[in-house]
Amino acid sequence: MQRIDPLINVLDLALRTLAGVAHAGRPYPGAGLTDDAAPHTAADRQLSGALMRVNHVGEVCAQALYQAQGLTARTPELRQQMAQAAREETDHMAWTKRRLDELGARPSLLNPLWFVGSFGIGLLAGRLGEAISLGFVVETERQVEAHLADHMQRLPASDLRSRAVVAQMKADEAHHADVAQAAGAQALPAPARWLMRAAAKVMTTTAQRI
């Protein structure tokens, strides 16, 4: 039963993630903004929807990554760290899904593929040892932080709700990277970082459309 329980938890997480039923534990960053804080044109609305779809995909991937790395963690401390980060990423997933709904946009049709692929990558990172697993977290979160900074530049100035969500996500991702770094992360070799950037580019480009 001890071996089966983690598998049941993973299956439950996958079903809840892909069904879009995540519930945030923190308030929605855009809740205090009025309906005027929205894209003013159809083109702006379409752009916001595409960018928030990409951000939602990133959170689907984060759920899979942290769950897999938590499963392979060799110490209770690392498992707890991964679980805490995953809870905050659940907030992000709920927020981005809510914003997609507000914009009349849909999540990526390829979310099952993103989840399965990310889970496999997380298992591999975890199997390589604690320092590498933490280093993977640092590199992933730094790349996501840069990606969110780019979205802050691209989002329509009138879309204050999306901007509030992205700003809070960016702060959280920076915190995750800092915590992992302080816990003893080992820097990944340059080829690994380049490969991660290339994979992220494929994902973000595809998710904007599909």
Image (cartoon, rainbow, N blue to C red):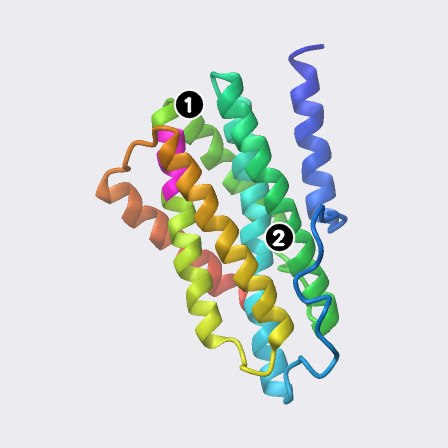
Residue 210 can be seen, yes or no: no
Secondary structure that dominates the magenta span: helix
69 versus 178 height, above or below: above
Residue 156 can be seen, yes or no: yes
The answer to whether residue 53 is left or right of residue 152 is: right
Q: Name which residue type carries label 2.
A: His
- Separation of residues labelled 1 and 2 (CA atoms): 26 Å
Q: Which residue is mark 1?
A: 127
Residue 99 among magenta residues: no
Q: Residues within 10 Å of mark 1 (few under 14, many from 20)?
A: some
Question: Disc 1 on helix, strand or loop?
Answer: helix
Q: Quadrant of the C terminus?
A: bottom right
Q: Position of residue 171 (x, y in %)?
A: 49, 54
Q: At 49% from the left edge and 34% from the top edge, which residue is drawn?
A: 120
Q: Residues within 10 Å of mark 2 (few under 14, many from 20)?
A: many
Q: Quadrant of the N terminus?
A: top right
Quadrant of the rendered structure where residue 181 is? Answer: top left
Frontmost residue, 82 versus 67: 82
Question: Disc 2 on helix, strand or loop?
Answer: helix
Q: Position of residue 69 (x, y in %)?
A: 50, 29
Q: Nearer the viewer, mark 1 or mark 2?
A: 2
The answer to whether residue 209 is left or right of residue 29 is: left
| Rendered image: mark on residue 92 | 2
120 versus 143 height, above or below: above
Q: At 44% from the left edge and 54% from the top edge, which residue is drawn?
A: 144
Q: Position of residue 54 (x, y in %)?
A: 54, 62
Q: What are the residue bounds of the magenta stretch?
A: 132-138
Residue 135 among magenta residues: yes
Q: Name which residue type carries label 1.
A: Arg
